[in-house]
């Protein structure tokens, strides 16, 4: 985002940002507004420094300065050009939003967690240019280093090289915590803000099958079988996969398989689902065994043996149409063929 900035250096109060188009989309998500204060005022010296370990600890807020005369060191996404560093204190568990504007240029933002004295490719958490970005679920007590930079040509062509950085937070609430108004924050991934009963306040409630830690156990026998997903089930976006998954609600199953031969084949297909992804033996992305997405919402996976005794299956669910008179249920079908098994 490019704009003209005033020339006075300042850091003034700012409230936490509300949800926007680039905010994480999750069931039960809320925002944290008006909860952070910069603790400084206009007229004070510029906070950003071109030596990352020399950056003073500051709270989230708005900060202004100039890139003119700053030294390149590769912190802003590991690319060259002048840059400045900010050391942001995250006092409570939060999602952190960063955005920046430049006087005739679009600043590049790179975010590190707790340590900036490493190459960006090893310690970087976020890189964005011209758009806002989020670092989600940052632990309380974390010091985020934000590197703001641009190319030398961009700074030299700018009238002033001036920038404005805005950092805001949204609280992340643990399971069991009271929830409700957007200003309270959002429930942690894997939970949603639900009413326990009519006389009790809402609280963040764990959603079964929303993450690997509470995946729904499902026994898959030889031959054909299947499962129907409740169309009113609440789910969030807890995982991304090689074929997609970003900002898509999903249900996670832990498939329990019988002992089969090394030539066994497991076909998994879905109706009214956006994508299917399988991982084994762990839930880590590097253990992905297959991923399939389809614009027609009928993806399928063919997993060839040797098959593990258990694997994680992620079912990505399409966004529902609130105006639809009927809802098509999501169905996942299994076909486990093992022609060489011992009967």
Image: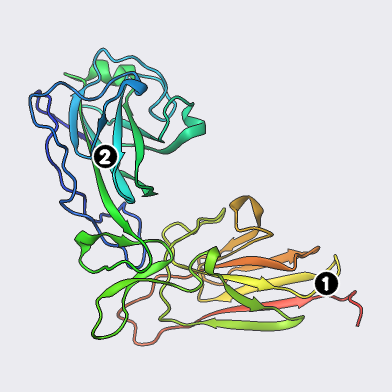
Residues at discs 2 and 1 in contact (Cβ within 8 Å): no
Quadrant of the rendered image containing residue 176: bottom left
Q: Nearer the viewer, residue 287 or 192?
A: 192
* Residue that numbered label 1 is attached to: 260
Task: Answer left or right for 186 relative to 182.
Answer: right
Q: Residue at x 42, y 24 (%)?
A: 79
Residue 266, horizontal then vertical, whole percent: 73, 71
Classed neighbour count for the residue bearing mark 1: other residues with Cα under 10 Å, few (<14), some (14–19), many (≥20): many
Q: Is residue 307 visible?
A: yes
**Image mark for residue 185:** none
Residue visible at 45% across and 35% down? 124
Q: CA distance from mark 2 to mark 1?
A: 53 Å
User: Residue 321: horizontal and vertical position, in percent?
Assistant: 35, 76
Among numbered discs 2 and 1, the one appearing first in the sequence: 2
Describe residue 303's horizontal placement relative to residue 46 as left or right: right
Residue 323 higher or lower than 22, as above or below: below
Q: Which secondary structure, mark 2? A: strand
Q: Position of residue 194 (x, y in %)?
A: 32, 76
Q: Nearer the viewer, residue 168 or 77?
A: 168
Q: Quadrant of residue 5?
A: top left
Residue on which disc 2 sits: 99
Q: Residues within 10 Å of mark 2 (few under 14, many from 20)?
A: many
| Front residue of this view, candidates 30 and 339 | 30
In the image, what residue occupies the spot 19% across and 24% down? Answer: 65
Res 130 seen here = no
Q: Is residue 237 above or below residue 334?
A: above
Which quarter of the rendered picture does the C terminus lie within?
bottom right
Under tag 1, what secondary structure? Answer: loop
In the visual, does 159 lie left or right of 172?
A: left
């Amino acid at each position: 985002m490019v704009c003209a900035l005033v020339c006075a250096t300042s850091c003034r109060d700012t409230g936490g940002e509300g949800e926007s188009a680039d905010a994480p989309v999750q069931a039960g998500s809320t925002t944290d507004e008006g909860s952070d204060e910069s603790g400084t005022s206009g007229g004070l010296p510029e906070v950003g420094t071109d030596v990352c370990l020399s950056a003073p600890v500051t709270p989230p807020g708005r900060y202004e300065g100039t890139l003119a005369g700053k030294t390149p060191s590769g912190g802003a996404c590991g690319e060259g050009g002048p840059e400045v560093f900010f050391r942001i204190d995250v006092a409570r568990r939060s999602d952190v939003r960063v955005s920046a504007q430049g006087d005739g240029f679009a600043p590049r933002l790179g975010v590190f967690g707790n340590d900036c004295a490493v190459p960006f490719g090893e310690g970087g958490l976020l890189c964005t240019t011209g758009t806002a970005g989020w670092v989600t679920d940052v632990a309380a007590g974390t010091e985020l280093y934000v590197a703001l930079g641009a190319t030398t040509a961009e700074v030299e062509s700018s009238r002033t090289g001036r920038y404005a950085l805005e950092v805001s937070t949204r609280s992340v609430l643990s399971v069991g915590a009271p929830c409700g108004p957007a200003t309270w924050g959002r429930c942690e991934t894997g939970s949603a803000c639900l009413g326990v009963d009519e006389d009790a306040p809402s609280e963040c409630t764990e959603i079964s099958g929303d993450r690997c830690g509470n995946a729904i156990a499902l026994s898959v026998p030889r031959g054909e079988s299947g499962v129907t997903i409740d169309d009113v089930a609440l789910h969030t976006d807890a995982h991304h996969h090689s074929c997609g998954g970003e900002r898509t609600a999903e249900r996670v199953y832990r498939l329990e398989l019988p002992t089969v031969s090394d030539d066994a084949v497991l076909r998994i297909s879905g109706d009214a689902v956006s994508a299917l992804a399988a991982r084994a033996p762990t839930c880590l992305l590097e253990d992905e065994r297959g991923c399939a997405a389809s614009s027609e919402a009928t993806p399928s996976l063919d997993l060839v043996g040797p098959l593990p005794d258990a694997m994680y299956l992620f079912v990505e669910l399409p966004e529902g149409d609130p105006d639809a008179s009927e809802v098509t249920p999501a169905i996942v079908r299994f076909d486990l063929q093992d022609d060489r098994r011992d009967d």
